[in-house]
Every structure is written in C-alpha cells, then in structure tokens.
Amino acid sequence: MEYNFRKLEKRWQIYWKKNNIFHIKENKTKKKYYILNMFPYPSGSGLHIGHCLGYIASDIYARYKRAEGYNVLNPIGFDSFGLPAEQYAIQTGQHPYETTKKNIQQYQKQMDKIGLSFDWSRKLYTSNPDYYRWTQWMFIQIFNSWYDKDSEIARPINFLIKEFNKNGNLSVNASTSFNYQFDSKKWKKFSSLKKDSILLNYRLAFLCKNTVNWCPDLGTVLANDEIKNGKSQRGGYPIYKKKMLQWHIRITAYVERLLKGLDLIECSNSLKKLQYNWIGKKTGTTIFLELFFSKKNDKKIESFIFRPEIVFGITFIIISIDHPLLQTITIPHYKKSLLAYINNMQENSVEKSEKEKNISGFFTGNYVIHPFINGKKIPIYVSNYFSVDPQVKSIVGIPSHEKYSLKFAKKFGLEILPVFFEKNKNNKNELYEGKNGICINSDFLNGLNAKEAREKIIQIFKNKNIGIKKNSYRLRDAVFSRQRYWGEPIPIYFKNKIPKTIPIEKLPLLLPRIENYHPKNGKSPLMRVKNWAWDEKNMKIVSNTLIDNKYVFPIETSTMPCWAGSSWYFLRYMDGHNQNFFLDNKKENYWKNIDLYIGGSEHSTGHLIYARFWHKFLKDRGWIKTEEPFNKILNQGMILIHSAIILKIIGKNIFVSYGLLKNKNSLSFQEIYVDISLINHNNELNINKLKQWNPEFSNSKFLLEKGIFYCKRKLEKMSKSKYNIINPDHISDKYGSDIFRIYEMFLGPITLSKPWNDQKIIGIKKFINKFWRLFHNNGVFQISDLSPTFKELKILHYTIKKLKERIESFSFNTSISYLMMIVNKLTILKCNKRKILEPLVKLMAPFSPHISEEIWKKLGSKKSILFSPIPIFNPKYLIEKKITYPIMFNGKLKFKEIFDSNLTIEKIKQKILNHPKTIFFLKEKVLQRVIIIQYKIINILFI
C-alpha cells in the first residue's frame, strides 16, 4: 500500500510553519553551525530542478547537523536588485517593484513545498530599504577610507588628511593612482577644490574615466564576470569597449590579501585555481625607457617586462588606449589617425574582436631608446591585442620568444631578434618560449642561463635606477556604476563637481518610483526624475529646478551594481532585525564565519572576489573580526537535460526533420530551440502544440519523415532561454517532495554535473513505499517491541557508521544507497522492531523529512523529529563472533588461525605461543616480541 504523500506533506509543511520549527536563536550552550546557500535572485520563471540541487543538499546537511546537536543557522533571502529582475520587468511590461514581490512569493512557496528547513524569520532582500540603507552606509565608509600599504589595512580618510597637514604625502605609502608629491606647506596652500580632487585619488571609492564593458542593448556597464564569450550573460547581447566616467572600488588594494586568504578557505582545487586565475598574479619587472621625442616633464615611459633576461630582444613597445601619456607620446602628425583607430576599436564588439583575434595596432610616431644598445630606436604602438597591466598600461614586445609578440611583429614587419637559444637545437630562428637555454645576441649576458642572466640584469636595472621588481595582476578595480534603474541609489551629491556623501542619518536614500524606468542612450533613468537634488542646508531631496550649486546640488544618477548588496548579505542574516547597526558584536561573535557556503561554480569568480574584499574592508575598519567570511565552500554541479532543437533552412521558413539532414547536405541550417514539453520520449515534435506555443510557426512548412517530425536533442545546462527547464512543482505533484529530494541527490555526486531522467524516478518511489511498508501491515501501523537480534543490530549499526561517513563527505548519493540496502535487508527479515526502525527513521529524516515526521509521530513522539538526536554507532555490533587472524613471523605470513572475538589480547597471546605451528617456527629461535592488533593481525618477532 502506498502512502498519501499529498495529504501527508501538506500537513507537515503547515505544522513546521505554524510552530516556527526552523526559527533559530543564539544559544551559548550549543555549538553553532552556519550553513548558507549562495544568494538567489528571484527570476520570473521561478525555481527549476537545477536550482533545487544545492538547496536540497544544504538542507540535508542542515538537518543532519541539527540532529548532531548543533545550533544551525540556515537562512535564505533574495538578491532582488539588479539586471535580471529589471529585464524580467521590462519583458513582461510590469514595474520591478511588483514583479520582484510576486517572484519572491513564488520562490518561497516552491522552497516550502520541497521541505527546505529555512529560517524565514531572517528573510531579507536587497531591494528592501531597511537592507540597502546599510549597503549605502558601507559605500560611504568605503568612500571615506584609503588603503595604507605599509600596515596593509584600510584607514579613515581623516587620518590621511591629518598626515597631509603634517607632512604632505612624502611618507605616505598608499594604494593610489596619484604620482605627484607635495609637502605640508603645498598641501595647505591648495584650494579646497584641489584638496578634494587629490583625495579622490586616494579614496577606496572613486570616480574616474576608464575603458569599460558597454552593453547598448542593456543600456549599462557590465563587469567582466557578467560577460561570456564576448556577450552579456543576461540576454546574450554584444559588448563594446567604451571610455566613461564611472564609480570604481579600489579592490586592487586588497589583491595580495585576497590571494593569501585562499589558504584559510576549504574548497576544491578547481575553485582556488579560478580565484588565482581571476586575480592573475605575475611576477616581473618594470623598466623605465627614455622617449626619443619627449616633453619637459615626460621623458620616460614605464613598461612591463616579464622576462628581463631577454631584454635585448625588445623590438617594440605596446601601450594601452587609456595610457595616461598616450597624447603626450603620440607625434602631432599621427593624432588624427590615432583617434580614428581608437574609435574603430570601440565600435567593434568584444565578441567580434575575440572571434577574429584581430591583430591591430597603431604606430604613435614615437620611439624609446634601448637601454643597452646605443642609439637603437624601438617603436611605440597602441594596441588592444595584448593584455597589459592595469597600473603600468604598457608592455615590451619580444617577438623571438613570445607567441603574441611574434604575430604582431610579423603583421607590422618589425624586427625579430633571437636572444635566447635552447641547447641542442639547430635552428636559432624558431620561436622559443622556454627557459632552458642560454643567452645569445645579448652582449654582457651571452652564455648565461636564464636564472644567471635574470639575476644579473635585475641588479643592473637596480644600479642604473632604470627598473624595479613589480607584480602584475589581471584583477582590475571594480566598476561600481550602473546606468540602470533597479539598484541601490549611490548616496552622493555633487558640489562643484566634487562628490559629497549624503548624511548618514538621512539614509536610506530611497529609490524613487518612476514608471518610465527603461535605460536610454546610456543615461540612467534617474536622470529623468524631477525631484533628484539635495538641499544641503535642510538635508532633504528637492526638485531639480532648485539646483543652484550653492545650497542645492544634483544627486548621483547611476545606481550600484547587484554585487553591492550580495557582498555582505551573509552578515545581515546574523542580526536581520537590528535597526541601530548592520550587525551586533555579540551576534557576530557567536555566528562568525559561514561554516558551509554552497552554490554554483558560476559564482566562483566575481561574487567570491567582491564578497571577500567587502568582508576584509569591514574587518579593517573594526566592525567585524574575521578576515575571511567562508570556512568551507562547496560548488554543486549542474543538472543537465536534453534540449529540443528544430532545424530551419537558412533564408526560408522551412523546417526539416532531423533524420532528413543527411539528404540535405547542400543546405545550411539554423538551430532553433523549442520547449521540451512539445516533444515525446521518441523525440517526436507535436507540430500543432508548437504553433499554439508560438504563433510565429503558424505559417512554417515542416518536412516530415513518414509523417513524423523528429527533433535534434542536445544534453546541456538547464536554461530558460533554451526552453528546457523542469518545474520542481510538477515532480512534487506527481511523486511527492520526499521522492523528488531523494532522486535529485541519487543522480550522482553533488559536485559533478549529471543528466536528468525522470523515468528512473520510479525506483525511488518503490524505495520510499518499501520503507513505509516496514511500519505498516496491510495499511495498519504495526511495530513490535521485541528485542532485536544481533544480525538486525549489525545491519543497523553498519548503516549508521556508513551514513555518518558519507554525509560528512557530502556523498549523498551513496548515503541513499546505504539506506536502500538497509530497507531491503529489513524487508527480507520482516523486521518491524521498534529498536531497529526508530533509529532508521532518524537516519531517513534529513533526506525525506515529511514521511519521517509522519512515522515519528506514529511511533509516539510529540515533538518534531528535527529535535531528535542522530543514532550513535556502536562498534561492538560489527565485531564478528569469530575472527581470522593472519599469523606473521618477522612480517612474513606463515598461517592463519581463528579466535573468539571476545578473547582478550593476553589470552590470544597465550594461545598463539602454545600453538604447535608457532612452537615449530620458533625452534632454536629467540622470541623478542608479540604484536597483536586486535581483530586484525598477529606479528611474532624473533632473532
């Protein structure tokens, strides 16, 4: 008899909610465990089964840790600001205020339906003013801070101002783009405007013009982690490089701490590698090269050389299009053409540039003088073909030993001079990028190996004061502006074009509700708000018509990126209802780091970098105590599914059945995704349903195979854009949430991607029904109080042991295998004994909470099974009555002997020494020692 899962699951979900079962408070008598899912954004399509993978895994572990006696914090909330929510609102013709509210309700309903034990009392969402008040507060603190490189810590900007008043910046070692030095006398003579401008170069949040990733279709700037294959991840739109005035966060100040901090995090090697690659540290040297055509104050240019031992091979210099000396370096005659070149580069999309791998460059008309070859002029080119250091913005070209330099040199007919030769190679003119060789054509370096030459040339650089050791990083300062509506307003107004912060006591700076929130021509929708000016005297927002730049000033119209709110949300969960501060010290001391952070690998770059930076900053300023926010990070894999694709003849409204493709070799086809609900298990398309699903196909012609249209299937990630998502509600409605939970975990290891096949879920259904029948006889609940046999206890305790091992290693699929094994064995034994089945229910509870609660109640408990301790493994039940010991003599096996398992070591020793075979082997030998490892081995040592 099957159990009524619909009635049962609904009843327990109501019970959990009514009794606040999952609500948690600090409890000093218990050890804490903080488990967290990476911040979901509430999309309009709701949850799909791919999303559920991480949620179910974390819920199993949360329930298990509670059963172990931990005080478990398992909160949830929503990353509701940002591009995804705004795009959905635009597509559906609604306002993001309404769509976000509806979507959050839908997500919560779906999460509750699959029995997730989230503490909803701590729910937060980033678009809530009570939340983004503190995001704005933190931005102001970042703005009012600078980074002291000597002490490796962020300090208040007031400290820096005091130092400027006392000594100028002569002894300041800060993370800054400001190169000009001044003493206290000069500082005091500067105007207030100039002082503010100088300070902006030191602040951790600053405004500057920079080349950014511009997406016209989305009307906003995008971060690197929001781009894939040259297109926006959201919508797949083309990206262009564009120079714009934007807010930035000086995240590069923390680059070394971001690298060191990875040692404090337990995670996969692949995740750490992603973080290392994203930061992209390279050790090299910068060399100062004398300009051939120079101006009074700009006589040298700094350029990166990663292998200084091949300095004699330099034949050209590359500078980026945003190099500060670009206009100074470029000869007047070339400037008009240079501008055309830069404009052309910006008109090409990032995708086109990456696809075509364009080797482009422009000669500035200027040169540098080679530091060791008298009179040798080296041409300077502008190019976006090379990856250059974001601070130095220049790199040397050594085509004989660098692949990209070689391609560039061949394109522009530049000299290729071999200066490093691999031993035992005949052709010195072949490209050689290795380091196993000797220097040639290198004057005083000739004959030296790479290490010797490197040490010598670096010392010469130092002696001549023309070069210094320096690290280069791929990581850039994070662009913080978005020209969109749906985001946190940046709490800044502009006084004489200098940014000033909105007073903290006036936060939050509320996002005004406007109906026309669409981006337009790269300008923020907030520019169209009529009341978006700051009255400094009365400290309030007033009409733009009152702006006089004396008392009333314009407010910043860009909004924050979505990563602002998601960079600290895990802290707010600890103290979500605190109106006085973002986090109370006592609560932070209790919960501290996230013990387990679980989510998709797509967050392994940008989000983790931003969140770790934000956390370190808050620690520097004394508001929290930990250096890293996460103790352990677990990336779940993806659930893959076969998408459905129909083939359209390019240029015609004709679709061809997949099996006919081999007969149409002369034609070109476009692949069109269609909803998988339109396809049966034989890959046959229902054309009538297709036309109802999308009327665009109404007039299309379909070429069939024997009356059937077959689709192409492709195994890939679930995605709304590919119409291949499965709603978990459909699975839960058909089979029950417990069966859905177990099946998702049974698909394979949590960290790997695996294909979905709902036909195999029947096996899980049979397993759950078999588990139910252990407690029921012909539908009647029936439990025996007879004492269990040793065999039954052995089966139980073996499962307890294995389950603990598997759950703690997050091997949930094999955990379920052991649960299946015990259910099968107990079914065969017809065991319905309380002392066996009661612990079994506890073991099942993290995986299938609804059915476990129901049986737990039938077993007589008045409390939720959530509060019941996990069964403890007793090793005595796994000890065999008879133990076969291998008998070793000086480590060599001679024979085997069986002993009762209850014998003491001393008794075993007496028996083995009196054994006839032992007496024989020890004949004329001197016994030294008998080593007995109980239940395993006996080793007799002699001389």
Image: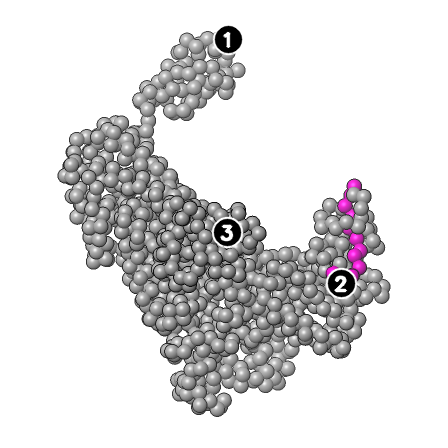
The answer to the question of whether label 3 and label 2 lie on touching residues, with beta carbons closer than 8 A, is no
Residue 240 is inside the magenta segment? no
User: Given the current orientation, which residue lies at the most extreme front position?
Assistant: 706
Q: Nearer the viewer, mark 3 or mark 2?
A: 2
Foreground of the two, 494 or 685 = 685
Foreground of the two, 81 or 792 = 81
User: Mark 1 — residue?
Assistant: 924
- On the question of residue 557 being in view, the answer is yes
User: Mark 3 — residue?
Assistant: 271
User: Given the current orientation, which residue lies at the most extreme right position?
Assistant: 374
Kind of residue sitting beneath label 1? Glu
Residue under the point 46% across and 75% down:
519
Kind of residue sitting beneath label 3? Leu
Residue under the point 68% across and 74% down:
340
Cα distance, mark 3 to mark 1? 62 Å
Residue under the point 54% across and 74% down:
246
Residue under the point 35% across and 60% down:
692
Earlier sequence position, callout 2 versus callout 1: 2
Q: Is residue 577 above or below residue 813?
A: below
The magenta segment is 411-424
Q: Nearer the viewer, mark 2 or mark 1?
A: 2
Cα distance, mark 3 to mark 2? 40 Å
Residue 414 is inside the magenta segment? yes
Earlier sequence position, callout 3 versus callout 1: 3
Within 10 Å of the Cα at label 3, are there few (<14), some (14-19), or many (20+) other Cα atoms?
Answer: some
Label number found at residue 412 = 2
